[in-house]
Amino acid sequence: MAEPTPSEIPAVKTDNLSRAYGSLLALNGLNLTINKGDLFGFIGSNGAGKTTTLRILSTFLAPSSGQAAVFGHDVVNEADTVRRIIGYMPDFFGVYKDMEVTEYLDFFGACYKIPSNQREKTVSDVLELVGLGEKRGALIGALSRGMQQRLGLARVLIHDPRLLLLDEPASGLDPRARIEVMAILQELQRLGKTIIISSHILSELQNLCNRVAIIEKGKLIYSGPVQGVRDQFASGRVFWVKINGDQGLAIEALKQRPEIVDAVIQEDRLKVNLRDHGTDPGILADTLVRGGFKLIGLEEEELGLEEVFLRVTKGETQ
């Protein structure tokens, strides 16, 4: 079999990845593939195995069994190479509060052996990218929590990594700061970065990520497009219907159709549940029009990622 070309090598690939802490199995045979350029959401309850996975990918933790590779480089046998091409931001990271912003980033630039004559421009570029250009001379201790999170992003970007591993980057932020961080991540994806983000704010991942994985008790439940998880785990489709006419009679007409599981009145609209995703919603309009009702509005209810997550997980931890 021919070796894969560089363009075919995924950003991240794990094969039966497992990690045990004594008798506790934190990861149990995780098989995960993340493509180059993905903004990938990693979803799971506390204790599901998200942080363990990110720590293995970042070379801070060795797997008990199985393998993991970043852009084709084994995280155990080629750890030094992997560290040069990743940026890892843990959920809690230390900052030197008495240092100025530029001093902090210059220090990490030196750690990554960026030449001194290049570091000033590199620091300036990453500060502009994360929206901290006006704070370059500020003390870190004087920054808000949101600004410190953005500084953390600047730190992991200082050596221009290909893969970002972000563990709860919006944790503890107010709504405005979360929106600002998510906008930065979208810009980084546009610039070609591959990003893995673990988060409990599922509504934001739904709009941010192109692919997601759901993990529980160390096992992968789903990995694929955001829309795919809805299609796979939603039991049916829900539509909101507005008519001109007797709502009670309309409900009776709709319930005669075997494709319709249930139909109820909620305020000035009808909520109709179709049996499965393959059912043509046109039957709703057809049934109502044939029954003499004037159809004013027909809208499908989009199942949110949070609701899907609650349906497919049990909230179990190790």
Image (cartoon, rainbow, N blue to C red):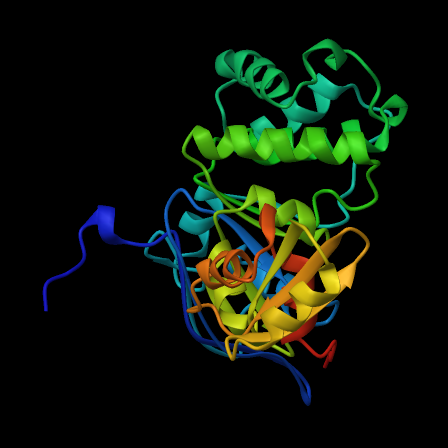
Query: Image quarter for residue 10?
Result: bottom left
Q: Quadrant of the C terminus?
A: bottom right
| Camera sees residue 161 | yes
Measuring from the top left, give residue 265's x and y in whole percent.
76, 62
- 282, above or below 273, in the image: above
Q: Looking at this view, is 318 or 108 the one in front?
A: 318
Q: In this figure, what is the number of numbered marks? A: 0
Query: Image quarter for residue 3?
Result: bottom left
| Camera sees residue 44 | no
- 30, above or below 171, in the image: below
Measuring from the top left, give residue 274's x and y in whole percent.
55, 70
Q: Looking at this view, is 209 or 11 the one in front?
A: 209
Residue 277 vs residue 138: left or right?
A: left
Measuring from the top left, give residue 284's x and y in whole percent.
52, 61
Farthest residue toward the front? 292
Q: Quadrant of the N terminus?
A: bottom left
Q: Residue at x 70, y 44 (%)?
A: 169
Q: Looking at this view, is 198 or 137 the one in front?
A: 198
Q: Looking at this view, is 80 or 101 the one in front?
A: 101
- 23, above or below 208, in the image: below
Farthest residue toward the right? 142
Q: Residue at x 65, y 50 (%)?
A: 243
Measuring from the top left, give residue 276's x and y in whole percent.
49, 73
Farthest residue toward the left? 1
